[in-house]
Image (cartoon, rainbow, N blue to C red):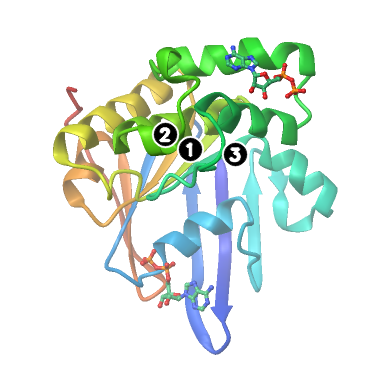
């Protein structure tokens, strides 16, 4: 469970997040929607403390992240994966190495890394691209590599920042189907930031509407599902 309590974040004088309290259940697919500049990306980055709140608490699976030491925070972050609009792959590394690096950084046992990378490649159906470089991949393939990298350390939570905003509708459906199966088969809690209502409606069970750094409302929806 992810609980943000009374969280605020300012950039200089500008209040990006203003006393936000939200609670996301384990196993849920939760959407964050709102206009550009509403604070969606900031709120997502407050969950894994990529942004440090000025006040309030962030509690993930019973751990109050805002009270942890830097070392303990690095450890806690292993259970939170993240993907981005522009994929953020390392351009001069192969698909294999892009995934392997996240295992190395997390001190995943060396003798188990190869099998784990292969497992992740199979999960996103990219085994045959392991030696390719990001520039040789389509947008959808790049996002699948990013997903494999995010899953490598077996996170319980996956944070997705506009994961389909660079993709065409067909590829968007394909990526949403992958996210849905990660939730279904691995039980990973998924939080998706998007400005696209159709994306949110297709897979989210609840959506929080943000405006000017505040929660406007949180509503339950029945996801339509995706077919890729
Ligand atoms: P959204 O994801 O809803 O578009 P963001 O969370 O990216 O919104 O940004 C919320 C507001 O905070 C915006 O007005 C943005 O310009 C500002 N902001 C975001 N990051 C920074 C930063 N690092 N420094 C200064 N202002 C920022
Ligand atoms: P190290 O952790 O020292 O890099 P690894 O055994 O994880 O050792 O991998 C060594 C290198 O071999 C990797 O950086 C990667 O480039 C390559 N490699 C390992 N396994 C594979 C594989 N199945 N397919 C392609 N390249 C691989």
Residue 152: x %, y % from top left: 59, 25
Whether disc 2's CB lies below 8 Å from ligand 1 is answered no
Q: Nearer the viewer, residue 14 or 221?
A: 14
Q: How far apart are marks 3 and 1 (CA)?
A: 14 Å
Compare marks 3 and 1 and give the one earlier in the sequence. 1
Task: Check the picture and name the quadrant holding the C terminus.
Answer: top left
Nearer the camera: disc 3 or disc 1? 3
Q: Distance between the residues labelled 3 and 2?
A: 14 Å
**Helix, strand, or loop for circle 1?**
loop
Residue 99: x %, y % from top left: 58, 28
* Residue picked out by circle 2: 28
Point out which mark residue 80 bears.
3
Query: In the image, is 22 to the left or to the right of 66?
Result: left
Q: Distance between the residues labelled 2 and 1?
A: 6 Å
Residue 98: x %, y % from top left: 57, 33
Point out which mark residue 25 bears.
1
Query: Could you tell me how many numbered marks the image carries?
Result: 3
């Amino acid at each position: 469970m992810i609980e943000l309590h009374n969280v605020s974040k300012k950039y200089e004088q500008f209040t990006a997040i203003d006393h936000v309290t939200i609670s996301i259940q384990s196993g849920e697919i939760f959407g964050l929607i709102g206009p550009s500049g509403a604070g969606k990306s900031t709120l997502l980055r407050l969950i894994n403390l990529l942004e440090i709140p000025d006040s309030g608490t962030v509690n993930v699976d019973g751990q109050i992240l805002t009270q942890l030491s830097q070392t303990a925070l690095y450890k806690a972050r292993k259970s939170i994966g993240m993907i981005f609009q522009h994929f953020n792959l390392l351009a001069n590394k192969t698909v294999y190495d892009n995934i392997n690096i996240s295992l190395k950084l997390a001190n995943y046992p060396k003798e188990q890394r190869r099998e784990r990378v292969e497992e992740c490649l199979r999960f996103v159906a990219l085994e045959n691209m392991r030696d390719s470089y990001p520039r040789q991949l389509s947008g959808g393939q790049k996002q699948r590599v990013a997903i494999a990298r995010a899953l490598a350390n077996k996170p319980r939570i996956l944070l997705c920042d506009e994961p389909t905003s660079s993709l065409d509708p067909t590829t968007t459906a394909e990526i949403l189907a992958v996210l849905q199966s990660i939730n279904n088969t691995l039980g990973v809690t998924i939080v998706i930031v998007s400005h696209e209502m159709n994306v949110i409606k297709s897979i989210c069970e609840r959506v929080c509407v943000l405006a000017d750094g505040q929660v406007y409302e949180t509503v339950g929806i029945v996801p339509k599902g995706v077919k890729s």
